[in-house]
Amino acid sequence: MPYRIKDPRRLPEEIRRIVEEQIDRAIREIDDKELDQDETVHQVRKRCKKVRAVLRLARIPLDDGKVYKRENVWFRDASRELSFVRDAATLIETYDGLMTHFEEQVDRSTFGIVRRRLTLRHKKMMESAIDERLDTLRARMETGRQRVSKWAKGMATFDALAPGLVKTYRRGREAMAAAYNDPSPERLHEWRKRTKYHWYHCRLLQEVWPEVMEARMTELSRLADILGDEHDLSVFRDMLTREGDELAEGELHEALLGLIDQRREDLRKEAAPLGARIFAEKPKHLNRRIGLYWKVWWGKE
């Protein structure tokens, strides 16, 4: 079933069902030997983030936060097992995206050596006991799944989810304001994380009014992608600065830094008005609006 609450009258069961589905899919992806390992890593890490988003939405009913704290750390650490592999693959994707964006302004073949070195770096990462780490991650998923049956037994209405929805949304607004005040890589990345979690929450709640929520989800996804690209370019720039001639020398190095800086500036300008619209509403107003949608949805079921 999809990643969303389908029946408002069975909220505890729905929360557990969604989490169990994500864990089961992660296990199947680890077991699928035909799936590319990069794709396996990407998908499994995404499953962990989806589980953590559910935890954030339902954090209050989960034993006054005790379950939330334990499980959030559990799935966060599970995802981190493979972060170094994903980071190496992301660098290649970031380089390719940069070259595609500036394809009419640069001779791509001139920068070919950079991609070859990034590819070699990625290959070495994939040889670093990746199968063993996937086995460890699979066992962690199995253990986590066994505890899900005890989750969320007390929640019954939207009031159980509202605090988690509001807290995540408020943090998104605060992160946006901080990023506007000082657009450092750290603050922009924090804004992106909060945007992503709010996007997941809208996905979970999309049945309250599908057309309205889907429109919001589309714009949230676009903002998260823009901020994600900005962050990936920031990481790429830091690596180029730190490792210097190991990836690019002399004028090639300076030209690549110039392209990165220009693209990052453009992305920040693109994110600003989009974010201002998405996070324009005060948290209490968002809470009231979604709560009213929920009541109408409940009445139609």
Image (tube, rainbow, N blue to C red):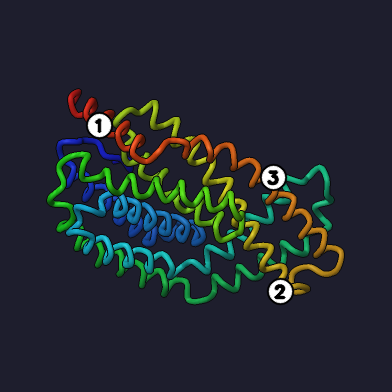
Looking at the picture, tell me which residue is in the foreground, 296 or 222.
296
Q: Earlier in the sequence, mark 2 or mark 1?
A: 2
Residue drawn at point x = 19 percent, y = 52 percent: 61
Dot 1 crowding, Cα within 10 Å, few <14, some 14–19, many 20+: many
> Would you name the residue on which mark 1 appears?
294
Q: Which residue is mark 3?
A: 266
Label 2 SS: helix
Please tell me whether residue 284 is drawn above or below residue 28 in the rendered image: above
Mark yes or no: residue 142 visible.
no
Question: Label 1 to label 3, Cα distance in Å?
Answer: 38 Å
State the image coordinates of residue 107 (x, y, percent, origin top left): 84, 51
Is the C terminus in the top left, top right, bottom left or bottom right quadrant? top left
Q: Is residue 68 left or right of residue 150?
A: right
Q: Is residue 225 left or right of residue 233?
A: left
> In the rendered structure, which amino acid carries the disc numbered 2?
Glu
Name the residue type under label 3.
Asp
Q: Is residue 87 visible?
A: yes
Residues at badges 2 and 1 in contact (C-beta under 8 Å)? no
Q: Residue furthest left?
A: 154
- Residue at the outermost right position: 251
Residue ID for mark 2 = 243
Report the front residue among 131 and 98. 98
Q: CA distance from mark 2 to mark 1?
A: 52 Å
The one nearer the camera, 138 or 295, is: 295
Residue at the image point whose x is 83% and y is 49% from the top: 106
Determine whether the residue tagged by mark 3 lies in a helix, strand or loop. helix
- Give the amino acid type for the residue marked by disc 1 in the picture: Trp
- Mark 2–mark 3 Cα distance, whole angstroms, equals 25 Å
